[in-house]
Amino acid sequence: MNEKLKQIGIPFILMLIIDLGIYISKMNVSESFSPQIGLLIASGLIFGPYGAVGSVAGNIICDCIKGTDIISSLLSGIVSFGVSYLAYKLWYVNYKKRNEVTQPKLNNTPNLTIYLEIILLCGALYSILHGKLAYLIYPDTIPIIDLIEILYFLNMINASFIMGIIGIWLSNKYKLTYIPKTSKKEVNEKLYKILIILLILSLTLTLIIDCCFVLNDYIVIIELITLSLILFAYLTKPITSDITINNKKSTPEEIMNIFLLITLFIMIIGIYLSYDSSLIAIIQKIIPLTKSIILISMILIMDILLLIFFIPSLAVLRYIEIKVIEPIVSFSKIKSSIRENEKIDSERLLNIYSRYINKDTEIGTLARSYTDLINYNNRYIENIHKIESEKERINAELDIATKIQASALPTEKIENNNFIVNGYSHPAKEVGGDFFDYYMLDENNLAIVIGDVSDKGVPAALVAMTTQKTIKQILKHEHNPSKVLYQINNELCENNPESMFLTLWLGIYNKTTKKLIFSNAGHNPPLIKENDEFKYLNIDSEIALGVFEDYDYVLDEINLTNEIILYTDGITDATNKNDKMYGEDRLLNFFNEFESDENPIRPLLNDIHDFTKDAKQYDDMTLLCLKIKND
């Protein structure tokens, strides 16, 4: 309700201010200067039926204050309402020349052309219908009825143009426009097209009759009734167009605003000169004519001069819109089609760009560039999707490989009355080159092995798993670690196209004799506990497997009475954000300070994590602990 009162109240108050302001100012030409009638079309166009009611009500009140009888004021009000409401109905017709139906906006040449057509038709209706009313109500005006109609028409089109431009700009800026709802009723569009054509034909016929025949009351009444009936019949047309609410600024609108600003400036200067009493008095001295004829002549001259500027300028603007602005607006539609990591809707956009693609202008170059860009983008996205699909497939396979590799490692500790052995491995990637193993060869002998392949990822994992499987096969018939390493080394040297190598430590512990025999192939020296203190076992590192063929590895033997810790260099090489390594000394200190009887693997990993914090690690970490029970 508040919105409706506002839409009625604004034009009502403006009509009072403008109409009474001119009347009170007692201008010398006030009898022929009626800019307030231009408010009728602007109010209907912007505020719809409520604006028409408000402006007409204000006009009737002003007429009564100025001394017009109530009957004349009401009849004039009915005509004025019909003309004001017609402007609103005509704007929301879906014309072929416009791309979309919006609220009143003079943002391009089609909308400006439609606005001018509405002003001309409404101005002609207003002037002719009021001329007929004046003929019937005021017989004294019959001799000058033609001048009255011309003056009404000139006042209407000039004032409507000025007030409409200003009103439309302000209403869009402050969001005051009344926007109708689209009717869902069945409408006979052809009937209303016929009515508007009949209205135009009736106007034309009325002008011909008025010029060619001597009028009388009967002819004027028939003309008045015919035009009024067709007008109000057309006003019953529901609004069926889909209306787009367009509040964003556009390049055509900015250009049009500059053009309209210049036009308004010229019009206001022209109107001021046309109604200037001093200028009229000078012309009267030179040419003995009445003020009304001089005024009409000056307004006509001003309008003709304006048309000489306006029509070519409008044609140039339309040419620029067609050749430059519309292509750019079309190109901007790509924005709604752009989605991250998605293909652009090429079919719709390429249909748009195809209209310009063969032009030899910058627009043609732009169209071809956009077309190429869309095609390149879509091919790139297709490739990305293929890569993503392949990546998903690889990730799924890596996930399976991770599970397979994990299943190949011992998952449970071995614990009996003589010893407890446990291990842990964590690859830097999904799969890694580290491995460990422990299992009973027979009732007395425990095999323990730890290895580290030189590479990372899938290739290293394949070598690690193959080596681990091969060790198990060889240990079934060979319990000499040095001979086992000898065979594995030769096999790796014979079939190693990627020149990969691995370090490996292999030992066999006899729980009866408590002797540990072992051989080392380039692996880190283990930690061994003697006399309640850990130290690094003093052994030769030898060379890694896969480097030299027929290499004889040394067989070592020690009495293991307490504990041995085997690890890969991912433990000692763990690096923090300052590029400082965990190191062998820190590892040795940890085990010497660790006094709990619990498994040390998890506490060690926590200590490494505290040292590295969130720094990314690039090497696999593997640990194996064998602890002898001395009960």
Image: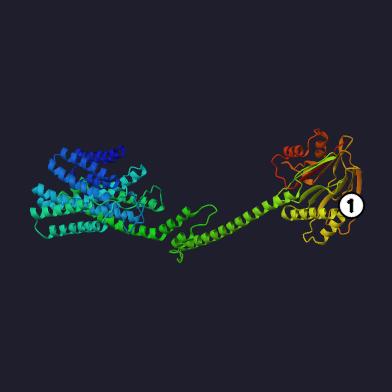
Which residue is at 35% across, 43% downward? 175
Measuring from the top left, give residue 575's x and y in whole percent.
74, 43
Left or right of 527? Residue 605 is left
In the image, what residue type sits under mark 1?
Asn
Asked whether residue 293 appears in the rendered view, the answer is no
* Of 116 and 533, the residue lying toward us: 533
Circle 1: is it few (<14), some (14-19), or many (20+) Cα within 10 Å? some
Residue reaching furthest to the front: 443
Asked whether residue 48 appears in the rendered view, the answer is yes
Left or right of 628? Residue 618 is left
Measuring from the top left, give residue 266's x and y in whole percent.
30, 50
Colour scheme of the rendered structure: rainbow
Left or right of 508? Residue 67 is left
Classify mark 1: helix, strand or loop.
loop
Give the residue pinned by disc 1: 480
Q: Quadrant of the N terminus?
A: top left
Which residue is at 82% across, 53% downward? 471
Residue 31, above or below 596:
below
